[in-house]
Image (spheres, helix red, strand yellow):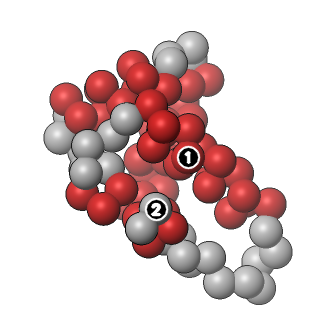
Amino acid sequence: MIVPEEADVIRRIFREFASGKSPRAIAVDLNKDGIPGPLGRAWGDTSIQTAMKFAQAHHSRRKDKQIQPFAEAMA
């Protein structure tokens, strides 16, 4: 299941990473912009890396399987 709000954040993370930003710099910007991280916590470089890995795994899975939202996966 794709959660639209989470999808927007994940797209932003990938865009910024592709433009050369480090996971730490992306986390700083998300926190500065008031975008809540997983489970409402602050973003960190590790949560950025995990979000990217989770998004890649989600993309590679078959469409007929249920995928849990990112925040639940981080619990």
Q: Is mark 1 on a helix, strand or loop?
A: helix
Q: Is residue 22 visible?
A: yes
Q: Which mark identifies residue 50?
A: 1
Q: Which mark identifies residue 74?
A: 2
The residue that appears at 77% across and 85% down in the rendered structure is 64
The residue that appears at 30% across and 25% down in the rendered structure is 28
Instruction: Provide residue 66's location: percent of width, then percent of height.
Output: 65, 84
Q: Can residue 3 be seen in this view?
A: no
Instruction: Provide residue 36's location: percent of width, then percent of height.
Output: 25, 50
Q: Estimate how packed mark 1 is, as few (under 14), some (14 to 19) or many (20 or more) residues with alpha carbons within 10 Å.
A: some
Mark 2 touches mark 1? (CB < 8 Å): yes
Q: Which amino acid does label 2 sit on?
A: Met
Upstream in sequence: badge 2 or badge 1: 1
The residue that appears at 33% across and 40% down in the rendered structure is 43
Relative to residue 1, is residue 44 depicted above or below?
A: above
Q: Which amino acid does label 1 sit on?
A: Thr
Considering the image in quadrants, where does the C terminus appear? bottom left
Instruction: Provide residue 73's location: percent of width, then percent of height.
Output: 51, 67
> With 71 as the anchor, is 55 left or right in this view?
right
Picture quadrant of residue 18: top right
Considering the image in quadrants, where does the N terminus appear? bottom right
> With 75 as the anchor, is 58 left or right in this view?
right
Picture quadrant of residue 26: top left
> With 9 as the anchor, is 65 left or right in this view?
right
Instruction: Provide residue 29's location: percent of width, then percent of height.
Output: 30, 26
Q: Estimate how packed mark 2 is, as few (under 14), some (14 to 19) or many (20 or more) residues with alpha carbons within 10 Å.
A: few
> With 16 as the anchor, is 32 left or right in this view?
left
Relative to residue 21, is residue 48 depicted above or below?
A: below
Judged from this view, the residue extending furthest toward the top is 20
Q: Distance between the residues labelled 2 and 1?
A: 9 Å
Q: Is mark 2 on a helix, strand or loop?
A: loop
